[in-house]
Amino acid sequence: MTKVRLAAVVLVAFATGIAGGVAIWDLDLIGVKQFSSEPAATPQESDGLYTCGMHPEVIREGRGQCPICGMDLTPIETSAAHSEKVETGGVRVSKNFLQNFAVRIAEVERNDLPARIRTVGYLDQDEEKLVSVNTKFGGWIEKSRVNTIGERVEEGDVLFEIYSPELVTAQEEYLSAMEYASRLRTGGAYSDAVDRAESLFASAAERLRHWDLTSHQIEQLAAVKRASRTLEIYSPASGYVVEKLADSLEGLRAVPGVTLLKIADHSTLWAKVEFYEHYLQDLRSGLSAEITLDAFPGRRWRGEVLFFQPAMNPQTQTLTGYIEVENSDGRLRPKMYATIEIELPGARDALIVPAQSVLHAGDHRDIVIVDGGDGLFFPREVEVGIESDRRLEIVAGLSEGERVVISSQFLLDSESNLQAAVERFVEGSGGAHQHAY
């Protein structure tokens, strides 16, 4: 076969991808010695295997014409291929080939392979630190001290003043019970009567506490001995006002149990993350996480996986998880997008290869090209495990210390596929016209 004809075969095979990607290489151009380091024998005119330069999938014994395009078939040198039997599909190449195509080799090593899930999410309120402000009695808000969402309040700050007829009545009952018990004590009444008056007074005070009056407010009421028309409502927690019932609270009628304000403590936030289904077998509460944001390049926050929603999202087929993130300096804000990396247990004492060394074939098959030494390479099917940091766990198919190709392996794989096709033809029924696909 001339160099021109061989080069044409290479180009056609690459362009059409015929015969499963098999390519026939110009032996002198790329340094492939057809399955042997010895010079190939000159093919005979009358015997041997022949192929079509335009259709390399056609292989037949003896001279003739291509049944597809009618071109004369050209010989394939096979004597060297059968003079040295190696692992099925093996191919021997020259040093020039390795240098020209920058073939790189890596050794299979045994080590731990920590795994990570890298995904995106957004920050949200820590729902465990979200407090609702409401009243347990009806009334009207007469003066509001907080009117803006995002306003910072501290625990104990006055939020608003409220007028409630029920509360005024309760204060008056408390003052009456206090005055009655005091009069009986100082008037020398029977002890049973004094005890009943004291019990009535304690019940009136307890009723005020049930309506969330503070001990200081009750003591002040007892000191001035006069019911207050309005009552100050204090913030139950420190944080930011994140929600309110109306644009303005002044003049608003408060209904028992209806939320008037929501206050969120942002010292911790939750990162809300969507996980795809194939990650679920590795996820659990308590895993460590690392959070980064575009707004703060170079800075990382630590977090911990808290819990997951009980059901998948049917629209996205993802599972929502929540990660607690420390925010003691207040730099993080809800609704910021974040990149999240979840640390998984990974694989222990595993066989590891670079991820680029594995060729993903059809039917969920994974192939590596193994360096057999002395210029000999052969494909081998492997079973892979987890992938992390551009490295792959090998579950089966390789041993520690073996060497695999991590660049240009598709060239070697194509050449080994051609040899396998030729060997299958020769070992077949011989003489009959055949196609090798």
Image (cartoon, rainbow, N blue to C red):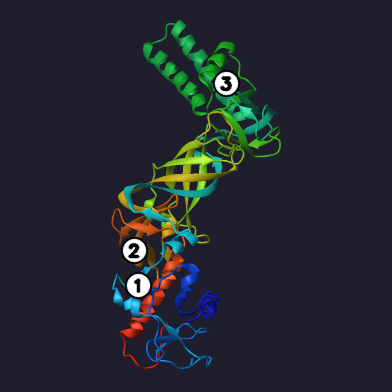
For the residues labelled 1 and 3, the Cα–Cα distance comes to 100 Å
Whether pointer 2 and pointer 1 mark residues with C-beta atoms closer than 8 Å, the reply is no
388 and 279: which is toward the camera: 388
Circle 2 residues within 10 Å: few <14, some 14–19, many ≥20? some
Image quarter of residue 93: bottom left
Going from N to C along the chain, the mark reached first, 2 or 1, is: 1
Q: x, y (%) of residue 366?
A: 38, 65
Q: x, y (%) of residue 377?
A: 36, 65
Helix, strand or loop under label 1: loop
Residue 172: give its label.
3
Helix, strand or loop under label 3: helix
306 and 343: which is toward the camera: 343
Whether pointer 1 and pointer 3 mark residues with C-beta atoms closer than 8 Å, the reply is no
For the residues labelled 2 and 3, the Cα–Cα distance comes to 85 Å
The residue at which mark 1 appears reads as 89
Residue at 45% x, 23% y: name it.
203
* Callout in the foreground (2, 1): 1
Circle 1 residues within 10 Å: few <14, some 14–19, many ≥20? many
* Callout in the foreground (2, 3): 2
Q: x, y (%) of residue 78?
A: 37, 80
312 and 385: which is toward the camera: 385
| Quadrant containing the C terminus in the rendered view | bottom left
The answer to whether one can see residue 234 in this image is yes
The amino acid sitting under disc 2 is Val
Report the side of 309 relative to 395 (left or right).
Answer: right
Report the side of 231 relative to 129 (left or right).
Answer: right
Residue at 47% x, 62% y: name it.
408
For the residues labelled 2 and 1, the Cα–Cα distance comes to 15 Å
The residue at which mark 2 appears reads as 382
